[in-house]
Image: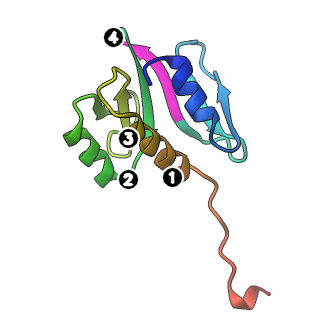
Amino acid sequence: MRTRQEAIEACLSLPGAFEDYPFDDGNWSCMRHGSNRKIFALIFEREGRIWMSVKNEPGWGDFWRREFASVVPAYHMNKLHWSSIILDGSVPEDVIEKMLRDSYDLTAPKRVKKYADDF
């Protein structure tokens, strides 16, 4: 995955995902959940490359950053909970897909727990 369109298509393959451009800058593609409108990925061009920022558990973010030079603290986001993947071909597709799915799951609507006395 190296292009903006490939990143967008990967995001749109997730259930209920949609593409949004809420900023006055067309460089920022926001990928959102349809149900709660939360952003699970930001796709943008920076320094001549396409970047994708995704949410991660703090421990996983640290792990991916140690493993791949092209995974860095997220640009313009909370550095503890978000990482940016520079789509330069150095991060394997399956790793990018896992990070994207994790972000999607972390931002998904919370399920209400049912308790026995609720029935």
Q: Quadrant of residue 11?
A: top right
For the question of whether residue 78 can be seen, the reply is yes
* 70, 81: nearer the viewer: 70
Q: Amino acid at mark 3?
A: Val
User: Which element type, helix, strand or loop, lies under badge 3?
Assistant: helix
Q: Which residue is mark 2?
A: 57
Task: Give the Cα separation between the discs numbered 2 and 1.
Answer: 8 Å
Identity, as a three-letter code, of the amino acid under mark 2: Glu
Label 2 – label 3 distance at C-alpha: 15 Å
Residue 95, above or below 60: above
Q: Position of residue 55 (x, y in %)?
A: 44, 43
The picture quadrant where one finds residue 49 is top left
Numbered mark located on residue 95 in the image: 3
In this image, 4 relative to 112: left or right? Answer: left
- Name the amino acid type tagged 4: Glu
| Mark 4 surroundings: few (<14), some (14-19) or many (≥20) residues within 10 A | few
Determine the CA span between mark 1 and mark 3: 16 Å
Residue found at the very far right of the displayed protein? 119
Distance from the alpha carbon under mark 1 to that under mark 4? 28 Å
